[in-house]
Image (spheres, helix red, strand yellow):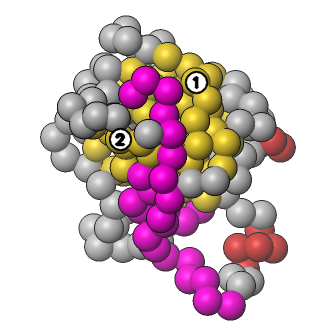
């Protein structure tokens, strides 16, 4: 799957691979509930600390946390967790969820939604706490309705594309790369 921009179905999840820094999995059933969809994100290699997830402010997050890769349970992060902090991603108001816990190829971040109430996107990145003000380059996965998926608009591709934008952070399904969050 390396080098691919497309989603690949593996069992009950969609795996997004290719030209991104992170590995994205979409689990169409979470915790045995077929009405819940979980987004799993982890580093492609190595580890990630001070990670951030961003969802549009109007989105309803059912649950979030960290857990083993493969949708095998989830707990709250232990190191400096926060949820629901307001920020801007480009021009879009978002809520941030994240922690200082180290993610690895075996430990991933999760966010869970009801299938009938999916947000337009979920973004993920690692905050550079050394920069002043702190900045966070984010990738995002976009959810589309089946009819939208079949007919991309003019000038759009269904692969990976760069996404530009600045965002303000408080204190520090196609995948798009390079959205900057910072103040």
Queried whether the magenta region covers residue 171, the answer comes back as yes
Residue 172 x, y percent position in the rendering: 39, 28
Which image quarter is the N terminus in? bottom left
At horizontal 71% and vertical 36% (from top left) the residue drawn is 57
Residue 17 visible from this viewpoint: yes
Q: Secondary structure at mark 2?
A: strand
Residue 64 part of the magenta-drawn span = no
Residue 73 in view, yes or no:
no
3D distance between C-alphas at marks 2 and 1: 15 Å
Q: Which numbered disc covers residue 135? A: 2
As helix, strand or loop, the secondary structure at mark 1 comes to strand
User: Residue, x 49% and y 22% (percent of image)?
Assistant: 65
Q: Which mark is residue 69?
A: none
Asked if residue 51 is positioned above or below residue 80 in the image, the reply reads below
Judged by its main secondary structure, the magenta piece is: loop
Residue in the image at 39% along x and 60% along y:
178
Toward the top, the furthest residue is 78
Which badge, 2 or 1, is on the more N-terminal residue?
A: 1
Picture coordinates of residue 129, whole percent (x, y): 27, 30
Image quadrant holding the C terminus, namely: top left
Q: Is residue 141 above or below residue 164?
A: above
| Residue at the disc numbered 1 | 85
Name the image quarter holding residue 81. top left
Chain part drawn in magenta: 154-180
Seen in the picture, residue 94 relative to 171 is either above or below; the reply is: below
């Amino acid at each position: 799957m390396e080098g691919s921009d497309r989603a690949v179905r593996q069992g009950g999840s969609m795996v997004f691979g290719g030209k991104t820094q992170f590995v994205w999995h979409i689990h169409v059933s979470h915790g045995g509930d077929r009405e819940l969809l979980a987004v799993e994100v982890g580093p492609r290699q190595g580890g990630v600390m001070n990670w951030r997830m961003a969802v549009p402010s109007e989105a309803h997050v059912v649950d979030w946390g960290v857990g083993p890769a493969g949708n095998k349970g989830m707990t709250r992060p232990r190191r400096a967790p926060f949820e629901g902090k307001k920020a801007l991603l480009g021009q879009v108001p978002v809520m941030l969820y994240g922690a200082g816990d180290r993610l690895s190829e075996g430990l991933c971040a999760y966010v869970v939604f009801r299938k009938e109430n999916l947000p337009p996107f979920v973004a993920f990145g690692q905050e550079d706490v050394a920069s002043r003000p702190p900045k966070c380059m984010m990738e995002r996965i976009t959810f589309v309705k089946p009819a939208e998926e079949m007919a991309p608009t003019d000038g759009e591709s269904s692969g990976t594309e760069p996404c530009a934008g600045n965002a303000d952070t408080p204190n520090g399904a196609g995948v798009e790369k390079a959205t900057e969050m910072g103040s």
